Amino acid sequence: MKLVVIPGDGIGPETMSVTVDVLKALDQRFGLGLQMEHAIAGKESLAKHGTTIAPGLLDLVKNSDGLMLGPMSTYEFKDESKGEINPSKFFRINLDLYANIRPAKTFPNVPTRMDPFDLVVVRENTEGFYADRNVESGNSEILVTKDVVISLRRITRLCCERIAKSAFELAMTRKKHVTIVHKANVLQIADGMFIDICHEVGKSYPEVTIDDFIVDAMMALVARDPGKFDTIVTTNMFGDILSDLTAELSGSLGLGGSLNAGDNFAMGQAAHGSAPDIADQDIANPFSLMTSAAMLLNWYGGRKQLPHYVQASQALEKAIEEAIDARETTKDIGGTLGTKATGQAIVRKIQLAA
Ligand code: ATP
Ligand code: MG
């Protein structure tokens, strides 16, 4: 597998560095034949090339089999005409990575106020309120006067259908329960269509039970009892917000892994941002990025019928669970180790794995 690795901003470089060590250990242990190609994007690229996405980067990625993208400092990227392109948005659009899969689950030794839960948010990744993430539609924010802005939200049948299908397929590998999250009481036409299409797609999965909740009520229900949920499908912005909540309820945003998947390509990326408040202090939790790497290996192994990739993915998840059991973790989830030492602990577990 040819894998492009982009460290990103803030806590990106330190968490990606240990994730690469872990990938190398998996490569040795499982004979993956990983060819890792290191590239830059974001602030580092802006300083060096005058743009966050240098010419040729997209081709490099398109000619690879997968991408690991570090977190990006999006607040500072405001003006595309100055080369300040949001790299997450750029790859999601240009590779049409429409399904953002964001699991969240509790672990016995991670402090949390919640009862155990294990769910996954399936977030539509290409339209909704972030429809400017689609090149063809142009910008979805309109400055009417200097004091009035209109933000448009685009919902299309095609995108509803494919995200619903992703959710039901995933639910079939889990507890076979899909929850549709929407705001159809206010956004009647758009979210009415979203719900209808999800139910329509659900007809092809008769074993899967379905319910639906308005997004505000859903926030309360998830905060009360996340154990009630299995696979949650929702539009872009609701999924963005809900998945931060579910990751944090599981113990820390630092546990939030994610996979951005299209039909033929996938990108592993932590669900959180660049966390500048804790950058360069060797305290960031690398499990979010490592979990994203595990998801990418699993996706690739499934697509290409390569069982050793799936085994490598499972071994990484198991190593993370064992590290959590042994409290060999960063302090956000109750451990005492730094980012580097946590990475080394995972590498050792992979090397020792039977
Ligand atoms: P960005 O602008 O890049 O989104 P942000 O300021 O919104 O950055 P987030 O990355 O979204 O920051 O993080 C929100 C909070 O969660 C921060 O307080 C951060 O320290 C914490 N956090 C995020 N990721 C991790 C991690 N991997 N390990 C520990 N804490 C984290
Ligand atoms: Mg953020």
Image (spheres, rainbow, N blue to C red):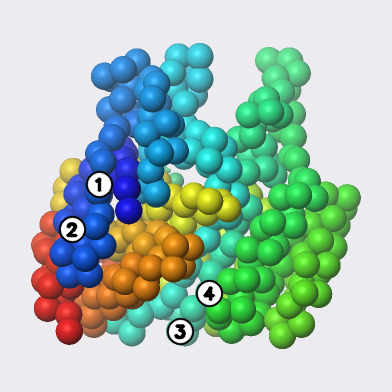
Residues at marks 1 and 3, CA–CA distance in whole angstroms: 36 Å
Q: Which mark is residue 24?
A: 2
**Mark before the other along the chain sequence, 1 or 4:** 1
Residues at marks 4 and 3, CA–CA distance in whole angstroms: 10 Å
**Mark before the other along the chain sequence, 1 or 3:** 1
Mark 3 surroundings within 10 Å by alpha-carbon count, few (fewer than 14), some (14 through 19), many (20 or more): some
Task: Identify the residue under disc 4.
Answer: 119
> Which of the pair 241/209 is nearer the observer?
209
Residues at marks 2 and 1, CA–CA distance in whole angstroms: 9 Å
**Mark before the other along the chain sequence, 2 or 1:** 2
Residue closest to the far right: 189
SS state under label 1: strand
Mark 4 surroundings within 10 Å by alpha-carbon count, few (fewer than 14), some (14 through 19), many (20 or more): many
CB of mark 2 within 8 Å of CB of mark 1? Answer: yes
SS state under label 3: loop
- Where residue 305 sits, quadrant-wise, is bottom left
Mark 1 surroundings within 10 Å by alpha-carbon count, few (fewer than 14), some (14 through 19), many (20 or more): some
Task: Identify the residue under disc 3.
Answer: 116
> Which of the pair 152/177 is nearer the observer?
177
Residues at marks 4 and 2, CA–CA distance in whole angstroms: 29 Å
- Where residue 295 sits, quadrant-wise, is bottom left
Give the amino acid type for the residue marked by disc 3 in the picture. Answer: Pro
> In this rendering, does residue 256 appear at all?
no
Q: Is residue 241 above or below residue 180?
A: above
> In this rendering, does residue 207 appear at all?
yes
Residue 246's spot in the image, x, y percent?
Answer: 50, 66
- In the rendered structure, the answer to whether residue 122 lies left or right of residue 91 reads right
